[in-house]
Image (cartoon, rainbow, N blue to C red):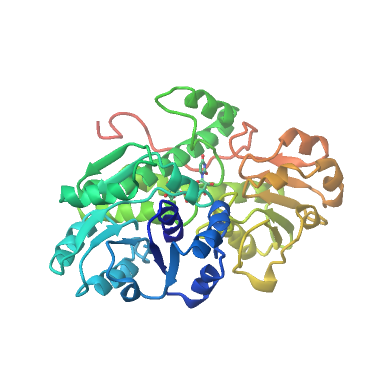
Amino acid sequence: MGAASAAFLAELGHHVSLVERDPDRRSVFEAGQVPFREPLLAEHWRALLERGVLRMASAVGDVLPCDQVWIAVGTPSLPDGRADLSQVESVVSDLEGTPGGICVMRSTVPPGTGTSLSTRLAKHGWGYVAHPEFLREGLALDDMERPSRLVIGSSDHELSESVKAVYGEQVQVPVVLTTVASAELAKLASNAFLAARVSFINEMALLSDAVGADVRVVAQVMGMDERIGPRFLEAGIGYGGSCFPKDTRALGSLGEDLGVPLTILRSVIEVNSRMQRVLIRRVRQALGGSFSGASIAVWGLTFKPGTDDVRESPSLTVVNSLLAEHANVIVHDPAAGVLPWGAQVPRAKEPEESLIGAQAVLVLTAWPAYQRVVPAEVVPSMQMPRIVADGRGALRADDWRHAGATVIGIGTGQPVGERVREATPFRAEALGA
Ligand code: UDX
């Protein structure tokens, strides 16, 4: 999230240039706007440009020499799960042979990357500091201004101090000065651990359904223990976005490459995709065993509320499964950008409109707008069997039931009469203890 870093550094009083190679995105930035949904950032952007503390550039070479180059390019997944470092590589090769400064790595790279990059860059007079970011989409500038911690990794204490000094006295947070490898692993481990919490509570949700418990209560009770804490215990159809899926895969691949199999992480990823299949199976069953020709409304396509991003959104997987099973799908989302299906999947302007004639609605992102829909006004417009499948625990189920809908959830303790698969024995000898 380079733009959030750039805006924050400019607010602190530094002279910042944001290098954006994509001409379309660059012209949006130059016009004082932000080409993605990041409300606080958008608010500040134009003023920073007007004050002249923030400039746009199209190439790294145009902004050199400068004291620090912060790299915040994408590191998406390659087909084998490893991180694609080609954008990082491209910036680093631009730095080689130019007047030296400090190269600050904000992008999430696999541990080991920084050590080899720093050796390379040192030959050209560049210092290297790993300084991973922990920004959430939709809250990126907020997270820059009030980070939970700053992690600064380098083999050279002076370089670390120079990066720390950028923040001045305004940012009062714990600062961890460490090695490059520890900083790199700390970032990936944080994302993987949060993903693990989500998958853990999702498995508890499936078990809740089997034993008639309510996973929200289970999560509430767990979260009251200070050692556990209440966050990232919301059960549903799983995590998505531009970070958790790719970072868990990258970490898992790294473990494999280094001969350290990350068994827990493998299960985290497996459980995550299972959750989407579970919801699909439950709705199919409620429809009498088939989606073929059924009219299905889908509410929510972004990977979480508060963003316009659909990258690796579980909703896309669900919609693709519905289409593969020949359902007629209509979608609604208040913010999602361009969608992959074209005319095959119409997009309703309002959630209510999408329910007219629908046999089922699947709620896949917990946008607050869906809570404001009045069940009694819309359920009569649906076709039988009027299924409401809440994949995010976003609705007040009782209100929908009273209005005549059949409500399906995940972890609500409603018996679903299914057995996902034969359990692996948990006896000690089966686990090799
Ligand atoms: C995440 C990290 O939080 C951030 O620190 C890192 O820098 C980038 O990745 P983000 O991708 O913006 O940020 O989303 P986040 O709010 O963490 O949610 C990730 C996914 O987990 C979403 O799909 C969300 O719906 C899901 N989630 C989160 C749950 O399913 N249950 C929860 O309890 C919490």
Please state the horizontal and vertical placement of residue 18, each as a whole percent of the image.
41, 66
Q: Quadrant of residue 186?
A: top left
Q: In the visual, does 172 lie left or right of 392?
A: left
Q: In the orientation shown, which residue stands out farthest toward the front?
A: 51
Residue 410 at what x, y percent from top left?
60, 39
Work out whether 94 lies above or below 187.
below
Q: Is residue 22 above or below residue 406?
A: below
Instruction: Please say if 231 is above or below 391.
Output: above
Residue for point 54% across, 56% down: 44
Whether residue 259 is visible to the viewer of this picture, yes or no, is: no
Residue 176, x across and y down, in percent: 27, 40
Of 31 and 20, which appears nearest the observer? Answer: 31
Q: Residue at x 83, y 47 (%)?
A: 378
Left or right of residue 53, residue 431 in this image: left
Q: Quadrant of the N terminus?
A: bottom left
Quarter in which the C terminus is drawn: top left
Q: Nearer the viewer, residue 216 or 421?
A: 216
- Considering depth in this image, is 293 or 339 the residue closer to the camera? 339
The percent coordinates of residue 301 (x first, y second) are 61, 56
Residue 402 visible in the shown view:
yes
